[in-house]
Image (cartoon, rainbow, N blue to C red):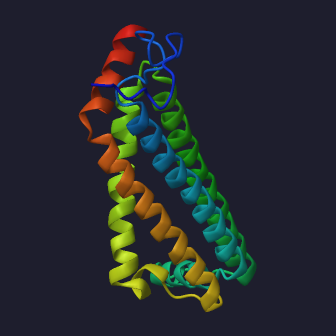
Amino acid sequence: MTSIPPLKPQNPDSPSHISGVGKKPRGADTMRYLLGSWSVMVFGELVHQLTNSVGLILDPSALRQAAADAARNRGQEVSDMMLTMSTYTSIAIMTLFQLLIMVLLAFALRAVARGQKWADAARRLLTVFSIFFVIRTLLVVIAPAAVAGATQLPVGFTAVLGVVQIIIGVAAACGLIYASRKEIHEALSHDTKKDG
């Protein structure tokens, strides 16, 4: 009986024939997908927050009305200039606070990617924000008018914000799925033990 020769000649020096070389560490693909999902989530949220801040600067009527109502409820007379200043100051403070949160999420993502000492805590932090983004996306889909709020901005602007929020929510859901995998928990706990 004749044997059929192999289609490809076997190369004993190829990485697949050398033990331990050419093999991916366990969970490497899952970690790559997790980092990709969370990167889209963090970058998308940064775009969303900046776009939202631009929208508030272009149409601050809702914030002006809230400030005027608050002053009226206290029985205070507030000038138009004071209302304008307080509105834009609150937009600036809110934008700064949102950017600080985005910086924290970026550092957490970096800690997970590099397997730093606090990588497991960073994974938990990103998981909590992922849950929030998924819930927010469900609200965008179920009750878009409630999420959009009262604004005089063009419908296209609000639609773009909604699309960005949906992309963030899908990336967050993927991140939740990958973050719950056993190999991710093992990889991050091993990295933490090595660093500690």
Q: Indicate the quadrant containing the C terminus: top left, top right, bottom left or bottom right.
A: top left
Q: Residue at x 45, y 10 (%)?
A: 18
Q: Nearer the viewer, residue 57 or 171?
A: 171
Quadrant housing residue 58: bottom right
Q: Position of residue 24 (x, y in %)?
A: 43, 24
Q: Residue at x 58, y 42 (%)?
A: 103
Q: Nearer the viewer, residue 93 or 174?
A: 174
| Residue 137 visible, this orientation | yes
Q: Position of residue 129 (x, y in %)?
A: 39, 51
Q: Residue at x 33, y 73 (%)?
A: 138
Task: Decide: is 129 above or below 11.
Answer: below
| Residue 77 visible, this orientation | no
Q: Nearer the viewer, residue 161 or 20?
A: 20
Q: Indicate the quadrant containing the N terminus: top left, top right, bottom left or bottom right.
A: top left
Task: Decide: is 12 above or below 28.
Answer: above
Q: Position of residue 128 (x, y in %)?
A: 33, 48
Q: Please give left or right for residue 150 compared with residue 180 in the image.
A: right
Q: Nearer the viewer, residue 70 or 189?
A: 189
